[in-house]
Image: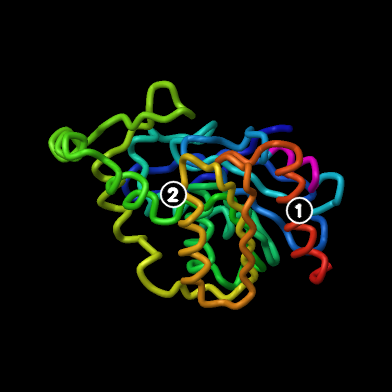
Amino acid sequence: MRVHFLTRDTPDFGPQKIAYQQTNIDAPGVGVVFCGGFRSDMTGTKAQALAEWAGARKIPFTRFDYFGHGASSGAFTDGTMSYWRGDVAHVLDALCAGPQILVGSSFGGWLSLMAALDRPEKLAGLVLIAPAVDMTERLMWDRFSEKAREKLNREGLIYDPSEYDPEGYPITKALIEDGRQHLMLDQPIDIDIPVRILHGQKDDAVPWQLSLELAAQLRGHDVELQFLKNGDHRLSEPDQIAKIIALLDALIAPQS
């Protein structure tokens, strides 16, 4: 499928290009938007599987790459939560008509929650896969050693080891500091749309307990949390993707 580009004008970096693909965009009914993970892109297993499902079901589907990710422009190390939050809002404003369900994977789960606060009128529901809520603080800063924190403060950049990236994730001081403006788990979250959370209990990147905290803080009552006892962080196996699709089908059916 051809990749298209959406321009986003920014005061800090000038015009930037957001890469995206869409399926059945003119079809009636609720649409689905996939928000991928940290350092991932829209060609991943879950994004591709959802595109195929949406194509077969004639459901409007949008997937895209954040600033500094995949085929989009920009340097990853220039990205912050504020900037990526703006990417999601811009995609919703420019590309998506009618109600949307956001499917947010890991980092994309946190961004999907932000989008629900920023564009409540556009969203019909959230499906969150191992949502990495407050990750810059809970999963990065709080976990870093004193040595790593000192280096980050001194040099502005460290590489965080990860099994998903042999070189380690580049983490900037700006990312950590900016992330503190977007923390959610310490207070009620004013989101009142259906939320479905799927989390593997063998997730070694985002602890499943974080999803318990999230569910407790969401203001709405239509919140369902499902654990997969043997699920890892990716949840990209066929049976796991089938569970994601089942959640989407159940949310879409009442609105069809």
Q: Which residue type does callout 1 highlight? A: Pro
Q: Which residue type does callout 2 highlight? A: Trp
Q: Which residue is mark 1?
A: 60
Q: Residues within 10 Å of mark 2 (few under 14, many from 20)?
A: some
Circle 1: element type? loop
Residue 186: image quadrant is bottom left
Q: Nearer the viewer, residue 78 or 26?
A: 78
Q: Nearer the viewer, residue 17 or 230?
A: 230
Colour mode of the rendering: rainbow
Q: Nearer the viewer, residue 9 or 47?
A: 47
Residue 170: image quadrant is top left
Q: Which residue is mark 2?
A: 84
Query: In the figure, is residue 246 to the left or right of 184?
Result: right
Q: Is residue 183 shown in magenta? A: no
Residue 16: image quadrant is top left
Q: Is residue 53 shown in magenta? A: yes
Residue 115 percent location from the top left of the image: 51, 62
Circle 2: element type? helix
Query: In the figure, is residue 192 to the left or right of 164?
Result: right
Residue stretch in magenta: 48-54
Q: Is residue 232 above or below residue 243?
A: above
Residue 7 percent location from the top left of the image: 51, 45
Residue 110 percent location from the top left of the image: 48, 55
Residue at position x 65%, y 58% in the image = 96
Residue furthest toward the front?
A: 229
Residue at position x 61%, y 70% in the image = 223
